[in-house]
Amino acid sequence: MTPMQTYDLVLTGGHVIDPSQSLDGQYDVAIRDGKIAAIAAELPLHITKATHSVAGQIVCPGFIDLHVHVYEWVTDFGLWPDDVGVNAGVTTVVDQGSCGPLTFLGFQANIVRPAQTDVRCFPSVNLAGALKGGMGTPALHSPDMVDLAALLKLARENPETVRGFKVHGESGALSRWGTQVIELARQAADAAQLPLYVHTGELFAVVEENRPAPDQVIDYVLPHLKSGDLLAHCYSCRPDGLMGDRSDPSPALVAAIQAGVRLDLGHGINFSFAIARRMMAQGLLPYTISSDVHGDFATPHNDATLDYSLCGALSKLVALGMDLKAAIAAVTLHPATVLQAEKDLGTLKVGTPADITILAKTDAPWICRDAQGESLIAPQKFIPAWVVKSGQLLQPHRRLLRDLVMAS
């Protein structure tokens, strides 16, 4: 006789969407010792310490936000990772560029280790990361601040946390140093066998006499990218962004995407419905959906200006026509693939860590907005109702989900 299975927690009656296993239907999910123990349309007779009904809700692998800023206090705009992580329906966050080789140990000790959320990072290619505001001191991001040996040492000594490098491909950097920093970043990424994550859209103060033509900026950047690298802020309204004022995307951009360069949403403060529609009409969808959540740039440690989120970004893209299963893949399987962690993250496969995001779908008109103030009436939105982190069931406080919880 087969012994009866025992579990710590069973989630019952939910609609499971797990792109890593092509699951799309009603399943029960059993958890034991912090890992997925079983998943089935109907579990055999079993014993469990706890049962939680998720009937009418969507059960997904734990969401991964590939672009956040969580080096709280060291960067003025850093947020606490659990506020934008488990308490926002996200089980893994990836900080983009807040730390560098000289500031990583503080990031590890004060952010990565204390957080309940799984925190990974793409350190900046500059030594110091985004100290304080960072943008007001462009010299921090100059070629003189790139130490290839230090970057390689950082990646080799911290392989679980350091999963790539962040660099800027925008007008301010190009007007000051041309592509020197990007070329150095390429060398670092190749040596460490990690991807580059490239910011797009004007950020640093521009040296006006050297300002590149907005529609040429991306063409300066693309020759330095390889398959697996990512372009951030793919639907940015900035004139020097991926689309800018073009009616059609650059042929070089299309060719790069076809060759394996990936688009990341990086919603942030420049997301544009108009740009999204134009690029989506050309079949250019984000490989990953991320939030770029951060605090106010002008006042230290102030999150009052934050009015967007990862689940809000997902809801907006679905409203714009992206298939829900594709959108869920873009916050689960795809970012796990970017992190080269798909054996453990972004999946509900038996034996993997029990990181789960549970969504409530609200079928009521929702007025959502982009960075330029354009409104879109969406027929539904997806709000995180519960998360499971390492087997523990948690109810997110959702304090920073102002776009979803407080929006009409």
Image: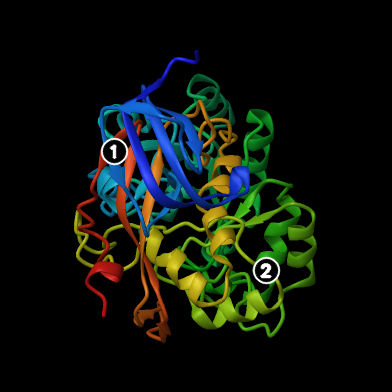
What residue type is disc 1 on? Answer: Thr
Please tell me whether mark 1 sits on a helix, a strand or a loop. strand
**235 on left or right of 205:** right
Quarter of the image where the C terminus is located? bottom left
Q: Quadrant of residue 205?
A: bottom left
Q: Residues within 10 Å of mark 1 (few under 14, many from 20)?
A: some
Please report contact status of discs 1 and 2: CB closer than 8 Å, yes or no. Answer: no
Q: Nearer the viewer, mark 1 or mark 2?
A: 1
Residue found at the far front of this picture? 1
Look at mark 1 in the image and give the residue it sits on: 51
Residue 284 bears which disc, if any?
2
Residue in the image at 65% along x and 68% along y: 217
In space, the residues marked 1 and 2 are separated at their CA atoms by 42 Å
Q: Is residue 258 left or right of residue 18?
A: right
Residue 299 in the image, given as x and y percentages of width and height: 20, 61
Q: Nearer the viewer, residue 228 or 64?
A: 64
Image x and y of residue 74, in percent? 27, 42
Disc 2 secondary structure class:
loop
Name the residue at 73% across, 59% down.
257
Please report whichever mark, 1 or 2, sits nearer to the chain's N-terminal start. 1
State the residue in front, 161 or 287.
Answer: 287
Residue for point 69% across, 34% down: 190
Q: Amino acid at mark 2?
A: Leu
Quadrant for residue 95, please give it. top left
